[in-house]
């Protein structure tokens, strides 16, 4: 019985010898009857991976000790303790029965950066109870994280994070608390993009109660919500907090500033609000803070401590405000500063020059002011972005000299003046320079032609002048050059840029250049990569030769002197038209399109303001924006035009002479937002389906449209502007307009609409302009005096209707825009299509200062009330004095009575006032004379009495402003006032003179009847009327004095008794 163990021992010795390496004897590791080597080989054989990518598995050599295999490490007892198969492109092969889970001595396992193709996490991971380090990040596992993971009680680091969004890993059942409850040794928890879906109390409590030794908490994009629980403060060792891209929707947790060892805090895009305590930035250990893209997050930067540890400071896209202290220079380790798109103001601190490690500085889109400081000492700086501030002054050449690592510079959108620093063209690594939208002036002087690596140079919208610098023609790496909207002058040819063979974008628009074109030179040979060419207002008289320009996508030749036909080859540029997306030939003298032609591929075509006639060109199905306005197109629109415009968002043929009906096919243009058919000769009815579309702007103004306005506006109507004015529309105003809650401009003027005043429009809270002028509206306007109605109405024009009743007593008080004490932010009513860059601008016809005019731009501060030519009666309400923001008021041609309210003197912004042709009585209030902005006044044809207030603004108005008021006196009327301020009787001598003047007029009138009527009618009055005879003789006397200059004749004539 004892022989069997002996035989087994002998067999074991032979087996050990057979596995010896170089004569030495290694103990073979067995696990459940298999060696660990066999387990590893079995693991490899079962894995699916790409051997061309693998750097570990492909090198596992069976003849070598497996402890020396790539990715494998063993402990002191030669057990596999570490297995790193990260980045091996493994896609399958780990399942419940995998040999991996038999490696019971594993302490460190990494399967990171593989692609297990949504394989669910095997619960057998929980068998590896010796694990201290488990990294399955970006490995492609999916499903619920098994409860068995909680058995890994020795874990120090757990990383199940992923950068793939959305993640397919879930912590639901078990929840986070049950999963991590046994991880008392854990120092790092990485569950980024794992769907935890827990509120603040849940996840904060779970972490703080289970992980007392935690140093790194990384739960970015883990579907966490707020509010934060201060129990997290138990984690006194916490040094790294990463919670980016969770929707906490709660105030910033103040207690985060109380973590004594905090080194990294990243909470970007977390919908945080409230105020960040400034002491957070003073934590000595803090190295990196990122609060980017929390749009409601407030705060300010403190006085920074000396020798702070901060290396990265990112507070972009917040509402942080205040100055940046000069103490920022104390942060000598700072390498990345990003404060863009916040509300910082004041000067850029000069101590920024002390930040020798600074690599990235972005202060763009703030309110920084003052001059640009010197950056010459920042030798490591690669990115400098100061775009969109209020920086002024000049930039000395020395401020940027020596920035040997600078790669990107953006100073655009400021108020910087002076010359462009010449040193920019000698920096050895500078590739991108944006200086547009400043006040740079003068010519650009570069002393030596040093090779420059510049790839993009943007100088548009400045005051640069002189010839285009020669160095620009030598920048052989340049791919983008924009010199638009400057004062560059001189004559040049596109061939002058011939060395810029890498050019992708060229913009020379709006200078004083005379660009000559050689039609025989094909630009495709010079610029084979050219994708954008903008030559607007370059005095072009010939089209550049763009045939075979296969990469061209955008062409702007607007505002030139091009005429004749648009060549048919232009539609074939850009890979036979398929790449060609943008064409602007507006403001030229093109008269026709060369036949045959086929437009294809374009997204935007702009031919407005030419002299094109006949039928409009048929746009391609790809079109997004079409502008054929201001031409001579006359033929009816194609019946199927709407079927072609499936993708179109903007379509305008305004200001042509197009006839015919509006094609109902427009209703099939499902993406259309702006439709402008105004100022044509369309007739017939408005297609009802057109109002049922999701249009934003519909302008059918000044046509011959008839019938009723269809009452078919849909629920959810998106209209912001509706202009149907100057047609012959009848019937009633459609009540379904109340569904258009976004409506800002409604113009139904100059039609034949017969309806009561549409009080139901008061529900449209965004309505700014209401014009119903020259219609047949009737009834009262009492609803204009209701509280909280019409909150944004700034222009209301009801002129020339049949409105009756009284002006509501509280109207001027309750129309909020009129009663506002301060002007709103200066802007104008418009609609901007960001996708196309199309800018539609609203307009409206008003009567201003007695003249009818069209406002091409409606400023948001412009306010006007016009109730003229109606049947309003009774008093002008005293609440008119509350309309402190009113600019124009016209109540003329009504039946208003009573006094002019003295409160009208409160209208300090009033520029035009017309109360003529009413029955107003009493005196002109003295307060009216205090309106210093008043430039038009008409009080004529009322029953006003008394003296016109003297020594004031009222003295600047003509007599016509006051005539027709028999009781008025004083300048500018030729009627004096007595001591009581009433009309005085004329003295006798003055009465005689007035009689003589009247007689003189009668003489001239009678003479004008002609000599044919003659002697009887002329001499008869002279013989029989003494008054006529005396006046006649005085006229003769004046004539004699002219022809007989001797003084004695004068005296004699004066002594005669005429």
Image: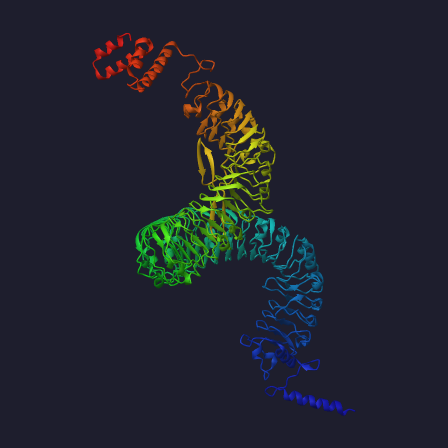
* Picture coordinates of residue 316, whole percent (x, y): 53, 53
Residue 455 seen anywhere in this rendered image of the structure:
no
* Picture coordinates of residue 395, whole percent (x, y): 39, 50
- Identity of the residue furthest to the right in this view: 1
* Picture coordinates of residue 1035, whole percent (x, y): 28, 15
Up-down relation of residue 730 to residue 383 (above or below): above
Given residues 775 and 708, the one toward you in this image is 708
| Quadrant of the drawing holding the C terminus | top left
Residue 1055 seen anywhere in this rendered image of the structure:
yes
Given residues 198 and 921, the one toward you in this image is 921
On screen, residue 335 versus residue 1008, left or right, reads right
Up-down relation of residue 659 to residue 110 (above or below): above
| Quadrant of the drawing holding the N terminus | bottom right
Given residues 806 and 907, the one toward you in this image is 806
* Picture coordinates of residue 8, whole percent (x, y): 72, 89
On screen, residue 481 versus residue 925, left or right, reads left
Given residues 690 and 945, the one toward you in this image is 690
Up-down relation of residue 669 to residue 1031 (above or below): below
On screen, residue 299 versus residue 515, left or right, reads right
Task: Give the colour scheme of this rendering.
Answer: rainbow
Q: How many marks?
A: 0
């Amino acid at each position: 019985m004892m022989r069997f163990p002996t035989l087994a021992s002998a067999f074991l010795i032979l087996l050990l010898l057979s596995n010896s390496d170089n004569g030495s004897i290694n103990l073979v590791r067995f696990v459940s009857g298999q060696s660990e080597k066999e387990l590893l080989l079995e693991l490899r054989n079962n894995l699916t991976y790409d051997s061309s990518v693998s750097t570990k598995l492909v090198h596992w050599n069976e003849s070598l000790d497996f402890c020396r295999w790539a990715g494998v490490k063993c402990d002191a007892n030669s057990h596999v303790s570490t297995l790193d198969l990260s980045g091996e492109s493994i896609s399958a092969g780990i399942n419940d029965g995998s040999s991996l889970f038999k490696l019971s001595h594993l302490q460190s396992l990494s399967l990171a950066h593989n692609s297990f193709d949504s394989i669910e996490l095997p619960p057998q991971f929980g068998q590896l109870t010796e694990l201290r380090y488990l990294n399955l990040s970006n490995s492609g596992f999916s499903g619920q994280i098994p409860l068995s993971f909680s058995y890994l009680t020795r874990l120090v680091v757990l990383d199940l994070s992923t950068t793939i969004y959305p993640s397919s890993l879930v912590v639901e059942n078990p929840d986070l608390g049950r999963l991590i409850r046994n991880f008392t040794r854990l120092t790092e928890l990485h569950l980024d993009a794992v769907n935890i879906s827990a509120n603040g109390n849940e996840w904060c409590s779970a972490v703080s109660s289970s992980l007392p030794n935690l140093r790194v908490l990384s739960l970015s994009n883990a579907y966490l919500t707020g509010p934060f629980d201060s129990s997290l403060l138990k984690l006194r060792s916490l040094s790294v907090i990463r919670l980016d891209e969770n929707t906490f929707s709660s105030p910033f947790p103040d207690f985060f500033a109380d973590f004594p060892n905090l080194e990294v805090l990243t909470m970007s895009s977390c919908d945080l609000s409230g105020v960040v305590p400034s002491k957070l930035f003073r934590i000595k250990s803090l190295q990196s803070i990122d609060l980017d893209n929390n749009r409601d997050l407030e705060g300010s930067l403190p006085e920074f401590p000396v020798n702070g540890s901060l290396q990265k400071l990112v507070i972009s896209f917040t509402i942080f405000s205040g100055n940046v202290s000069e103490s920022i220079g104390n942060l000598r380790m700072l390498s990345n500063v990003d404060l863009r798109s916040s509300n910082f103001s004041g000067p850029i601190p000069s101590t920024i020059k002390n930040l020798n490690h600074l690599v990235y500085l972005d202060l763009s889109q703030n309110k920084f002011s003052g001059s640009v400081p010197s950056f010459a000492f920042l030798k490591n700086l690669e990115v400098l972005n100061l775009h969109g501030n209020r920086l002024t002054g000049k930039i000395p050449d020395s401020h940027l000299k020596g920035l040997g690592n600078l790669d990107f510079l953006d100073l655009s959108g400021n108020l910087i003046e002076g010359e462009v620093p010449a040193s920019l063209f000698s920096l050895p690594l500078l590739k991108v320079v944006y200086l547009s939208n400043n006040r740079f002036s003068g010519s650009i002087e570069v002393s030596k032609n040093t090779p420059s690596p510049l790839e993009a140079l943007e100088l548009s919208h400045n005051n640069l002048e002189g010839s285009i610098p020669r160095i620009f023609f030598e920048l052989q790496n340049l791919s983008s050059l924009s010199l638009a909207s400057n004062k560059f002058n001189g004559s040049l040819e596109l061939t002058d840029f011939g060395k810029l063979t890498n050019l992708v974008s060229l913009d020379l628009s709006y200078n004083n250049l005379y660009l000559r074109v050689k039609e025989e030179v094909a630009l495709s040979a010079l610029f084979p990569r050219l994708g954008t060419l903008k030559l607007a207002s370059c005095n072009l008289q010939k089209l550049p030769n763009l045939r075979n320009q296969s990469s061209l996508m955008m062409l702007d030749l607007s505002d030139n002197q091009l005429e004749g036909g648009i060549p048919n080859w232009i539609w074939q540029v850009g890979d036979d038209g398929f790449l060609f997306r943008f064409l602007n030939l507006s403001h030229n003298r093109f008269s026709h399109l060369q036949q045959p032609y086929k437009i294809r591929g374009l997204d935007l075509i702009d031919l407005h303001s030419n002299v094109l006639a006949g039928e409009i060109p048929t746009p391609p199905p790809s079109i997004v924006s079409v502008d054929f306005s201001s031409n001579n197109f006359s033929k009816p629109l194609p019946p199927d035009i709407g079927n072609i415009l499936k993708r179109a968002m903007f379509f305008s043929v305004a200001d042509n002479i197009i006839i015919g009906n509006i094609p109902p096919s427009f209703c099939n243009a499902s993406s259309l937002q702006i439709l402008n058919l105004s100022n044509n000769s369309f007739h017939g009815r408005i297609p009802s389906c057109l109002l049922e579309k999701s249009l934003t702007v519909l302008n059918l103004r000044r046509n011959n449209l008839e019938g009723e306005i269809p009452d078919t506006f849909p629920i959810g109507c998106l209209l912001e502007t509706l202009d149907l004015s100057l047609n012959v529309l009848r019937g009633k105003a459609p009540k379904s307009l109340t569904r258009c809650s976004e409506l800002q401009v409604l113009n139904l003027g100059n039609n034949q609409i017969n309806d009561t005043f549409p009080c139901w429009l008061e529900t449209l809270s965004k309505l700014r302009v209401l014009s119903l002028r020259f219609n047949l509206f009737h009834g009262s306007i009492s609803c204009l005096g209701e509280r909280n109605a019409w909150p944004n109405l700034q222009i209301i024009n009801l002129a020339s209707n049949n409105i009756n009743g009284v002006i509501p007593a509280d109207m001027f008080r309750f129309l909020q825009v009129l009663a506002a004490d301060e002007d709103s932010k200066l802007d104008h009513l418009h609609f901007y299509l960001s996708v196309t860059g199309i800018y539609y601008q609203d307009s409206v016809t008003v009567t201003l200062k007695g003249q009818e005019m069209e406002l091409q731009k409606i400023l948001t501060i412009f306010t006007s009330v016009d109730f003229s030519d109606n049947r309003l009666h009774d008093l002008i309400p005293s609440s008119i004095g509350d309309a402190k923001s009113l600019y124009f008021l016209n109540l003329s041609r009504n039946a208003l009575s009573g006094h002019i309210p003295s409160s009208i003197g409160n209208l300090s912004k009033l520029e035009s006032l017309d109360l003529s042709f009413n029955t107003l009585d009493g005196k002109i209030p003295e307060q009216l004379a205090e309106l210093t902005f008043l430039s038009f006044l008409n009080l004529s044809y009322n029953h006003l009495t008394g003296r016109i207030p003297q020594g004031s603004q009222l003295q600047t108005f003509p007599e016509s402003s006051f005539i027709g008021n028999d009781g008025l006196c004083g300048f500018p009327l030729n009627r004096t006032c007595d001591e009581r301020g009433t009309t005085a009787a004329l003295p006798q001598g003055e009465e005689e003179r007035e009689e003589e003047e009247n007689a003189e007029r009668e003489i001239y009138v009678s003479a004008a009847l002609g000599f044919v009527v003659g002697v009887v009618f002329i001499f008869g009055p002279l013989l029989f009327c003494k008054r006529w005879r005396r006046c006649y003789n005085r006229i003769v006397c004046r004539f004699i004095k002219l022809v007989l200059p001797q003084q004695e004749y004068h005296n004699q004539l004066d002594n005669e008794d005429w």
